[in-house]
Amino acid sequence: MSSIVWVLGAGFSRPLGGPLLADLLLPRALDNLRYRFPEQEYQPLFAPASKAAHWIYNYGRRFEYGHVYHWDRENSGDFFWRDAEEYLDYLDTGAFRGSQSPPAQQLLQLSDRCLGSISPSAAIPRPSINELAAAGRRLLAAESSAFMLTLDMKSERCEPYIMWARQIEPSDTIITFNYDGVLDQLEDAAKTLEVVPPDGDRNPNLAPVYKLHGSVNWASQERVCKTGDPFFALKCEAYSQLAIASPGPTKQAIANRLETLWVKAEDALASADAIVFIGYRFPQTDASARRRLLRAIGKNEKQYIALHTVLGADVGSAASKRLHGLLTYAICQQERFELPRRDNPPDASPSKFVNLVTQPLYGEDFISVVGRAQITQAYRFIRDI
């Protein structure tokens, strides 16, 4: 039976309501989260550290999308970071290097400025740099998974995902960098796949799902484990309990605790018949993922391997071109020949062959119309140009 490895990023969940990087930490973020998560139940999510972490991001983006608080509408802000990913990395760096480090000092001063303006008549206890970093990670987890509260697996927009999950074979492997619970929901709905916890073994009758960046329903305690709470990350108090590998120095620490999943994911890539990237582009802060996954793909010794990238209709976008380039160099580790013609099947010679296809589709399009044969035997469906 052919084995397909599915590598899923934020673009996979996007059609269901999941956010992309550009959607995170915008001025209305905390207000929007209040509609979904009652403040009394999710107090850490709305603590002073969260308010400060949220405001600091928008201040460092020159309030590009508007101001967070009315008292700051005349402030033009500064340009410190390009996006939420870079900001969260900077926050985590401050916590990692300690409260006396330059990044921490800058962030703490901005935090004082924010909280002092929010409550000028009553002093708000100053959050530590660890609390600020934890608040940033918690906001990331909340915004990445808030859509799950209203997601109905019986709805029309979920139909392609249910159909896709039901066609998954036990020989397949799903690798995801998403924190949300979409695949957990598909596990329950389709009964064909299983989210494998770091401390657990896979069921050989189900396709394993490896969450390489953790999950909002996992806890980092003596070991990283599943909890019964789908939004544990939004409630936990301690910086060390957040089992999500968000941008920054501590990402590697969490990844180390998920090492068993990484090894299994690498083994799957090294033995796959086909690999499909949906909505994942190897973000620039994912240096470890880029190195490990591309190296595993390069070690694949199958005579023929099909690679598909699915990042949207614009195959000329910078993200599509970059992913295509990364994969091109990865497969060069084995001497392979491109095989685009119908009259030259992969068993025609002992040489190794590859098809690397950049699909002009969105993720929900691809999983709706492209079948297993078209994925694993792409050479049969590609015209000569």
Image (cartoon, rainbow, N blue to C red):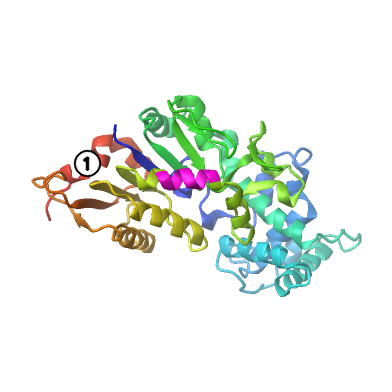
Q: Nearer the viewer, residue 284 or 144?
A: 284
Could you say where residue 45 lies in the image, as x and y percent from the top left?
Answer: 73, 47
Q: Residue at x 48, y 46 (%)?
A: 263
Q: Residue at x 76, y 62 (%)?
A: 129
Q: Residue at x 52, y 56 (%)?
A: 21
Asked where in the image residue 265 lies, by quadrant, the reply is: top left
Could you say where residue 299 lies in the image, as x and y percent from the top left?
Answer: 34, 53
- Residue 108, compared with residue 45, is above or below; it is below
| Residue on which disc 1 sits | 377
- Residue 162, compared with residue 246, is above or below; it is above
Callout 1: SS: loop
Q: What kind of residue is marked 1?
A: Gln
Q: Main secondary structure of the magenta part?
A: helix
Segment tinted magenta in the rendering? 260-267
Could you say where residue 197 lies in the image, as x and y percent from the top left?
Answer: 57, 37
- Quadrant where the N terminus is found in the figure: top left
Residue 344 falls left or right of residue 9: left
Residue 66 falls left or right of residue 373: right
